[in-house]
Amino acid sequence: MRYNGPMIKRFHELQERVLSYYPEANIELLKKAYAVSTDAHLNQRRASNEPYITHPLSVAAILAEMKLDEISIAAGLLHDVIEDSQYTREDLARLFGQEISDIVWGVTKISKISEVDVEDAQAETLKKMIVAMTADVRVILIKLADRLHNVRTLAPLAEEKRIKIARETLEIYAPIAYRLGMGKIRDELEDIAFMHLYPEDYRRIKEEVGGRTDWALQQVESLQQRIQAMLKELKIKAEIQYRIKREISIFRKLQKQNIELENVYDLLALRVITDTVANCYVIMGAIHQQWVHIPSRWRDFITNPKSNFYQSIHTTIITREGVKFEIQIRTQEMHRNAEEGIAAHWKYKEGLAFLENDNRLQWFREMIDYHKSNPDPKEFLSLVKRDLTPNEIYVFTPKGKVVNLKAGSTPVDFAYAIHSEVGDHCKNAVVNEKLVPLRTRLSSGDVVEIVTHKDSHPSADWLRFAVTPRAKKRIMAWLQKEESAEDLERGRRLWQKVLRAYGRRLRTGFSEADIARRLRELRYDDLEAFLRDVGGGRQALDRPALRALFPEAGAVAIAPARRAAPRRGERHRLISVEGAGDTDFTFAKCCHPIKGEEIVGYVTKNRGLVVHRRDCPNVNAEIPSRLKRVSWMEAPDYTYRVKLQLLADDKPGMLSTITGVTAETGSNIKKVEIEPASQAVVRITLVFEVRDMFQLNDITGRLQALPGIYSLQRRKAAAG
Ligand code: MN
């Protein structure tokens, strides 16, 4: 089934189509929209050399086939006006009112993508579509009709452009249509895109299927007759349709299951469309009585609709000749719903109010929510793409309730689908009466039971195997909450220990108001926020921090760091200096740059060129003539000495854990010192060698993740 009413070339044909389902439609509005659109696109032509107006007219015609309201159809006529002509959003608002202007603006915004990178552009498009859709779903219906007409007329475009459009259609537009339950438009978008994107596979499959068509039709027709006779006996009225599986579906099946075409057993499918739900089951029973059916292929989507509300019974039977057929049984209403989806229940008099309650939009709302909590565009794209692919599994609770999950889901996803409390306290999973690890991938038909315990909680590990956005979002929320509580606790302990270590001077004479004021200068709202950062390793509780907090005590309690002079070295091959060949230089002793850090050269009177970290406070950027642009060279076999100072719990095994972690990264440890910092806290000084910043970051990352480490500071390195 296609949106392929007769091609519309003239406005009056559109008018007739609209009046056929909507006799009281405001035709004057449509005429005006057509006139403005014609004017706006007056001298424009499509790649096919047809006048441009044929495109908006065709889009409006598709929308009329969906039986949409006059606002949508007017907006369809105008959908490219803002983007491609002098007319502005304000002009449209003045001429047609706010609603139409807003919809056209929504469509325009989606098209305006500036990203060069394909993934970025897709992420951007997708985000805009989802946002626009949750505001007014008609924006997306127009965009889908627009895309449908565009892919129908792809042929005259250059190959590169065709492929880009086809890919985007397959990866984004078709899946969105699926989510909205719009099977008809989804199928056509996919079929055309597949033809352009995989021309070889398309031809091969079409040929192979074509060679079997006669035989297949014979089989289908004989089965159809037998079912017809059966229906007559049952005195049930039903329409029977049949089809041969679409090329892209065959392609996917061949790829996924790595099988030959002969083994695609739902290559042939019959559809029985009747009037009532009860009759659907009667027909199913009769069919199962007459033919052998494959139990694992039997699905009751009437009782348990798919997440896009698709309803139907699917069953696969084997004829006496040994041919397998898939038979779908559904009511007329379910059928219309499967074809038209969200557009099926468009009631032009009720308009948007009706749609707002459509649960098919729920998925999009969840995506927006997830995006707010995790705004990384690429991750968003990959999650949405994965989620848009229609693979779903159906598993059962021990009481027989069906739970609809995405393919690849685990017991953790299942637990969160049941209830967030079940997920948050999920301990064990029993699948088909066997205890299994939580990371197990579930399959359709599994019976899943979750054992909860009040002390069981999500772990970061779960994020690696959970696949549903709902589960991922809840796990992240839990981890964040927990981490922040742990950080605060750790920060608090350290704060008290440091205060104790520095003695009375810090503890007396400073009111809480003083501390609060200075924290605000350090851009913290309160002591808790500060301690949370200290505990999480994002803020050091070291000398500079204490000096900032207690400036009056600084001179006495906190000795200033001694500055060392840079040392001349002979490492001229390690860096290159702009505008110079081999230049002798030294690494600055104040900041000790390590390969990979941003650096700058600074010319001094006595010591020649000294290389500093770019952010080193000792570089005086106000004398540009003294600055030299320098960069790292690919120099093998050189290591940089680094000194780290850690405050850690004084507990047995701590030191060996720390040196173990450092050694694991392949770093060479030169020196380890340990001294008490205060009661139960030790200061550990580590001197080791690294090749570059990557290795150093690796080490500090691992150290920070260890329990019982309070702070970690890079210090001036020992002479290397
Ligand atoms: Mn367009």
Image (tube, rainbow, N blue to C red):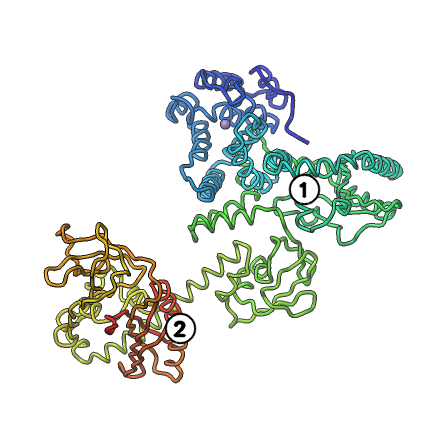
* Drawn side of residue 326 relative to residue 1, left or right: right
- Residue assigned mark 1: 249
In front of the other: 118 or 62: 118
The residue at the point 13 percent across, 59 percent down is 604
Is 298 rendered above or below residue 178? below
The residue lying at 33 percent from left, 61 percent from top is: 635
Mark 1: amino acid:
Ser
Q: Could you say where residue 529 lies in the image, as x and y percent from the top left? A: 30, 64
Quadrant housing the N terminus: top right
Q: Are marks 2 and 1 in contact (CB under 8 Å)?
A: no
- In the image shown, does 88 or 345 lie closer to the viewer? 88
The amino acid on which the numbered mark 2 sits, given as a three-letter code, is Leu
Q: Secondary structure at mark 2?
A: loop
Pointer 2 residue: 706
Residue 219 drawn above or below residue 439: above
Q: Considering the image in quadrants, where does the C terminus appear?
A: bottom left
Q: Could you say where residue 431 lies in the image, as x and y percent from the top left? A: 66, 65
Picture layout, residue 594 above or below residue 354: below
Q: Secondary structure at mark 1?
A: helix
Left or right for 380, reference 452: left
